[in-house]
Image (spheres, coloured by chain):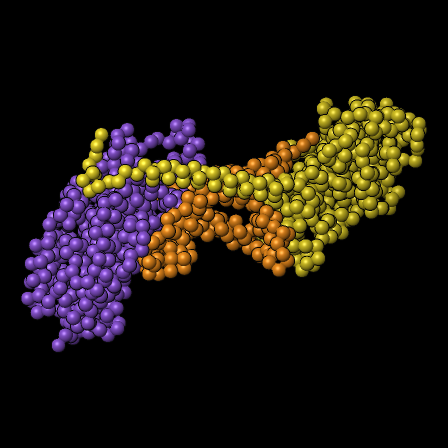
Amino acid sequence: MNNPNFDLLMWARGPGFDIALIIFAAGIVLRIVEIIVLGRKKDLAPAKGNGVAQGIKTIFSRSIPRKGLVHYAPITYIGGYIFHLGFFIAFFFFGAHIVFLDELLGFSQWWPEAISFQWPAFGRVIIESAVALAVLAMIALMYTRLTDPVRRALSTFDDYLVWVLSILPMVTGYIAVNKLFGDPVFMLALHILSVELLMIAFPFTKLMHAFTFVMARYYNGSIQGRKGAES
Amino acid sequence: MADKPMLPELMKAHGVSRRGFLKYCASLTSLMALSPAMMPRVAHALENAPRPSVIWLSFQECTGCTESITRSHAPTIEDLIFNAVSLDYHHTLQAASGHQAEAAREKAMKDNWGKYVLVVDGSIPIKNEGFSCIAGISNLQMLKDTAAGAAAIVSVGTCAAFGGIPHANPNPTGAVAVSEIIKDKPIINVPGCPPIPVVMTGVLAHFLTFGVPELDELGRPKAFYGETIHDRCYRRPFYDKGMFAEGFDDEGAREGWCLYKLGCKGPTTKSVCATLKWNNGTSFPIEAGHPCLGCTEPDFWDNGGFYKPLSVPAGDYRKLGLAAVGAGAVAGAAGAVLARAGKAKAAAAHENVDAHDLEKKS
Amino acid sequence: MSATLERGLNALREQIDAPVASFFSSCVSCGLCAEACIFYRETEDPKYTPIHKLDLLRRLWKKEYTLFGRVASMFGLMPSITEDDLKEWEELVYDSCTMCGRCSMVCPVGNDLTMMIRKMREGMSASGHAPIELVGAAGRHADYGSPMGELHPALHAQIKHAEKATGIPIEMDKSGADYMVLLSAQEIAEFPDVLAAMSRIFKKAGITWTISNDGFEATNVGIQLGNRDVARTLVTKVVEAAEKLGVKGVISPECGHAYQALRWEGPNLIGRAYDFEVIHIIELLDRLRAEGKLTTKGKDMGKLTFHDPCQINRRGGINQEPRNLMNMVAGNFVETDDAGTMNWCCSGGGGVGANERAADLRFKAFNRKKRQFEKVNPDKIVTMCAYCHHTLEEQLEEHNMEIEVAGLTELVAEYLDDE
């Protein structure tokens, strides 16, 4: 006698995760190395400002919308913010996720005692509000993607796929934690599997921006910074 | 069966008042998730049920289930219920041994053919029947023989219900659950390592009063295995607030915070441990400061480690992950070298364009 | 495949580097670049979305610069760029982009789309898909020394005129001068007063300067075309002239793309740093102001506003300098909305102004500035780019608006305290 739900969960936590991790890790490293090794020519024009400093600054400062722009695309800006914040809160501050990240990256095992840490978890009200808002934000974002001419014209299969793969973990996670329906073990397995799908799709889709945005912002900031221009 | 006393006499013999008996019926009724209106029926059934013969077979097991059931405080009403049945064979509890014991089983079977209840604890080895025998009879044979005349089978404990620890990887004896062998009888699984005494007696009581209770997809009575421990855990508010014990000796552990991070399987384990508790409602593992092992679920021994949190990958993924990072770096560098070669080729093939050479040529 | 198509794709291949790869890898198709684009905002036509204008470059990158793309192309999933593609994108890349750089400022993942447009134009021009006006200008510049043809006689006449007006002699080809002044063809032809203005300011400041007969024209149609071979030829001429005279610095005139060409692209085009400093005239004037060598008296009491040239401010980093000077000479200086780093383009930059085909689009795009000017309702618009100056005058006339446009250098000279 066995429990197929548990078998699925154990597959998701075992081989399923291994497969997803290999594709995720190898794919992301591949894409990042591919970009860095491509390199760029040294700029021979004498610098007026500090490109490196501004590049680093831009990595952070670009998170703030430029004045006047929110007005033109409120759903994209506000929805984008809520989605990203909600997703990060749920991903980084839910206890079960913290212990996952800790185990995965070994904060409290590999690292010297002095720098090993686990950050405190948020309560259910915050996590679930964040998830609910993030899901609503994603629905709003999809609405603009489908109705706004610019976004509809830009959208490819990639965009729709990534939307589905990003919303699934939030929905399945919410259902699993709240036991809205379905067997809790099965829903937990579904949640983990949905994350694995996201991991597998990661290197092949625009999800890569989660890593490459650092490079893109740095390059933009450093190009402008050398000229003494804002970025 | 006529020589066996009915319940009311037994109650008197044990000094249990009618009031006490009805109280027990009421708690049983709620335990079995029945409407309070059903209580009189429960009482009536228990009062008038003839004491059925019960044969208890123990196979590959640790006797923990028996230990558990005997820990039901005497003279409690649970104890009484066991007197309400005629336990005709139980090789740990019976006085008889050897041929006498087997003769008792055979007699009970013969006398009650088709009516007796078979309780099994322990799994059955099928890799080699000889791995576990009683009185020269293999477990497999004894189960098949005894099950043939049973009205129903109650698989007590996770070993009998799902294979349990003997079934755990690598399962050297080829241990299987009762339900893997017996396909033509109603089987009630009462898993747990061991099950809560009152759950065992409650299931028996239900069977005596209303027959086979409503079961889930794993053959467990829904009344006792309908909700997860997590849902009823008194530490649940800490989970909801994000307050976790990180070790067995930290502040969180002392304060009684949630044990999720220490590997608690409460969220995926269905049982009434958190409400009925053990030792006459004294405590249960989580209350004692230990995470739930998930013992009422199949394969609990192999479900990723007792101290690994549920959200943590179960495999040995670290080496794989590091290898993937290495492979990705190599592949990425190779890809970039290819790209750079293409770019260098393009640069080498660069035709200087002069201001008069900007028109399209075909 | 035609020879020019292959030459164009080859030129594109040469342009792809780590920044380009990181930009395309990061795009999430959020469409916010469109909201910053003057052409999209004023037409609301989604084809003017900046990232869409770069689609051919993106396709080439994906197909030839990523491992996954290579694999996909083995299965025939990555169609090659065709002549028809280039034809379709020519309008997007040249007519509907002034390389103003607003999109690069708003992209949430930090993509420098403008820099990629510049790169994409390399492929477009090499494949013979540049607007004919720019191609013609490049020919004239190569043959006669300026995009407007032979300008030596005009220059000499304007110098004479300036000498007469100021009484200060202007010595051409003077070795060892502090600065070599460059002018834009637009200034020589349309706004020659700048010569007299500089003459007076530099005299007051005690700066020696000269103009070279070998290289006095600063514009560089190679940058607008997006052709570094052409751009290199044109920059080389100026660099050689400056190094021959042994000047300490070269003054980049009030011209947007000329500043980009000389200051930022030039050393990379010729493959080495210069022996001299390149400074924009407004940068120099502000430096003189800070050193106390430039003083004014009196102020223009009309309502003045300032138009920031994209290549000088947003893409060039000169933002505060003109404002310091404006505050010296303007008694009623009012900024328009978005002034400064996020100013809207005059709609004529990046070669769009010369492109006849783009005229209607350009007029439409100017509505943005029109509304901004109407809100401020200035008496005079001051700028520091002769081409912005030219475009503003053209557009104001087209839109029946009567506002004077002035160059900042002339305005400063007007109130110069050179008693």
**In the image: residue B232, left or right of residue C149:** right
Q: Is residue C220 visible?
A: yes
Please give left or right for residue A103 compared with residue B150 in the image. left
**Quarter residue C357 falls in:** top left
Q: Which residue is drawn at 72% across and 34% down?
A: B169
Farthest residue in the bottom direction? Answer: C419
Using the image, determine if residue C399 lies above or below residue B198.
below
In this view, B144 is above or below C335: above
The image position of residue C232, as x and y in percent, is: 25, 48
- The C terminus of chain C lies in which quarter of the figure? bottom left
Observer-nearest of B256 and C386:
C386
Identified at 44% across, 35% down, the residue is: C68
- Which of the 4 image quarters holds residue C242? bottom left
> In the displayed structure, would residue B231 be above or below residue B107?
below
Residue B150 shows in the view: no
As drawn, the chain in yellow is: B
The chain letter of the orange chain reads A
At 52% from the left and 49% from the top, the residue drawn is A91
Identify which residue, B61 or C419, lies in the foreground: C419
Q: Where is residue C312 in the image (x, y as percent from the top left)?
A: 25, 57
Residue at 63% across / 32% down in the picture? A4
| Residue B170: percent from left, percent from top | 73, 33
Please name whichever residue, B66 or C223, is drawn nearer the observer in this view of the structure. C223
Colour-to-chain, purple: C
Q: Where is residue B85 in the image (x, y as percent from the top left)?
A: 83, 35
Residue C92 relative to residue A152: left or right: left
- Residue C384 picture quarter: bottom left
- In the rendered view of the protein, which quadrant contains the N terminus of chain C? top left
**Of residues B336 and C377, which is closer to you in this image?**
B336
What is the number of callouts on the image? 0
